[in-house]
Image: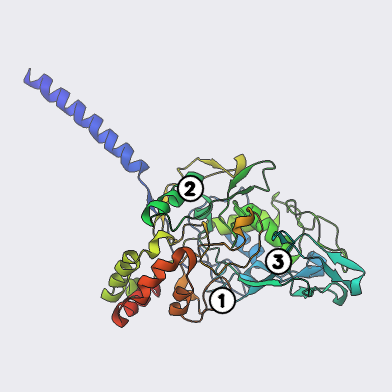
Amino acid sequence: MTHRLISIGVLLLGVVVMGLTGIAQQSATEAPAGFDTPTLAQNAGSQSHNNGLIEPSGDTYALDQQTYERVHDVTTGLGPVYNGRACAECHQNPVSGGASQFTELRVGHTDANGNFVNPTVLIDDGAASITGRSIINDRAVVPEAQEHIPATENIRALRAALNTLGDGFVEAIDDNTLKAIAQNQLDLSEGRIHGEAIEVPVLESPGQNRVGRFGWKDQHSSLLSFIGDAYLNEMGVTNRLRPKDTTTIGKTTPDPEDVPDELGLADIDHFAQFVRGTKVPPRDAKLAATADASAGQAIFEKIQCNTCHVESITTAPVGTVINGGAFAVPDALGNKIIHPFSDFLLHNIETGDGIVQAGPADTANKLRTAPLWGLRMRPRYMHDLKSLTLDDAIERHQGEAEQVERRFDQLSPAQKQQLRAFLNSL
């Protein structure tokens, strides 16, 4: 009888251990962090390390980075209008994939009913025009194609180039997670703060939508969509997702200019593979361990900055199918805890640019919450880079964030310094 009880006990213990092991295997783990994609003039990608993402057959992370850093000219599809000659030209601080000091120019106007309208930009001395987009490109391959701001466009805004490090994890966030954050904000703020989640098309899956999370207006929900759109609008390179140039003036190459290589991968595929493989921006471990930074984080939470600058988010489980069926969350990105200090939702804090891109009319004066990871690598702040100090950036938060900003104003000089210490550790 005793042996039988012992046997049953061992069996039950085994079941419990197996159950606990299963739970442990399913537990979320921290996403790897590091500035591990140095930009090298020679042997690009040779010293880089990805987050564990498995490469397609024949591909390497070094090749992805080389493609990301490749400088284009007219023979490889640059222009006719463009802002940069390589992805890394605008996304490079402190390593390839980071943010930068570059800004892009957006303009437009409102009609008689107050609706935002994209500009019609005359080029080639008025003989041709570019329509259907708010962006004005700073550069052109020939003078005849150069864009200028029409006098009719009284809505004018600058937007900073975004950090893309860790964006593979952002892509892997489940839509319902973002929607739940938006709903929770209503409760936390007694209805004053409510991020807007908008559904936007997935370019690689025609007819499918997903919650937007990339771009200042959340205009894209997948990295491939974001990248394909940027390849055209920032560099003028047509691709399978954006197959037509904005003008033919000065154009010498056939569309689409981005075609598959010997591996069957186009540039936009390599770009997506590179960004999905980046690690999240790391904190300054030495500063983060100080008493001031720890106290500053407590203040950050107490005055409720973290209502929108959400400190921790867990990505979708491994194998979750996203992007309209075009992508399954891999082991490297699934069930990972990230600390972006953002909700990736649209808010009106009265710094909006008045431009509507992918969302409804009410998004005109809303912008995506800027992720604060990697903040210490930025000398200028906010979407337009017009804030030169952290205090000024915080004080510009009005609208939905007005009460939070008031709490900041009420802090003592010592408390403000502690808050700065925390922010400078990110």
Query: Does the rendering let one see residue 426?
Result: no
Q: Amino acid at mark 2?
A: Lys
Q: Amino acid at mark 3?
A: Glu
| Marks 1 and 3 in Cβ contact (< 8 Å) | no
Would residue 214 be found to the left or right of residue 245 on screen?
left
N-term-proximal mark, 2 vs 3:
2
Report crowding for label 1: few under 14, some 14 to 19, many 20 or more residues within 10 A (C-alpha): some
Where residue 203 appears, x then y in whole percent? 68, 48
Report crowding for label 2: few under 14, some 14 to 19, many 20 or more residues within 10 A (C-alpha): some
Would residue 345 be found to the left or right of residue 68 on screen?
left
Q: Residue 258, which numbered label?
A: none
Query: Does the rendering let one see residue 224?
Result: yes
Q: CA distance from mark 2 to mark 3?
A: 30 Å
Where residue 8 appears, x then y in whole percent? 16, 23
Where residue 139 appears, x then y in whole percent? 76, 75
Q: Secondary structure at mark 2?
A: helix
Quarter of the view holding residue 79: bottom right
Tag count? 3
**Where 19 sits versus 173, above or below?**
above
Would residue 332 be found to the left or right of residue 72 on screen?
left
Q: CA distance from mark 2 to mark 1?
A: 28 Å
Quarter of the view holding residue 303: bottom left
Reading the image, the residue beneath label 3 is: 234
Q: Residue 179, which numbered label?
A: 2
Where residue 212 appears, x then y in whole percent? 58, 52
Residue positioned 85% across, 70% down in the render: 122
Mark nearest the camera among 1 and 3 is 1
N-term-proximal mark, 2 vs 1:
2
Residue positioned 42% across, 52% down in the render: 186
Q: Residue 385, which numbered label?
A: 1
Q: Amino acid at mark 1?
A: Leu
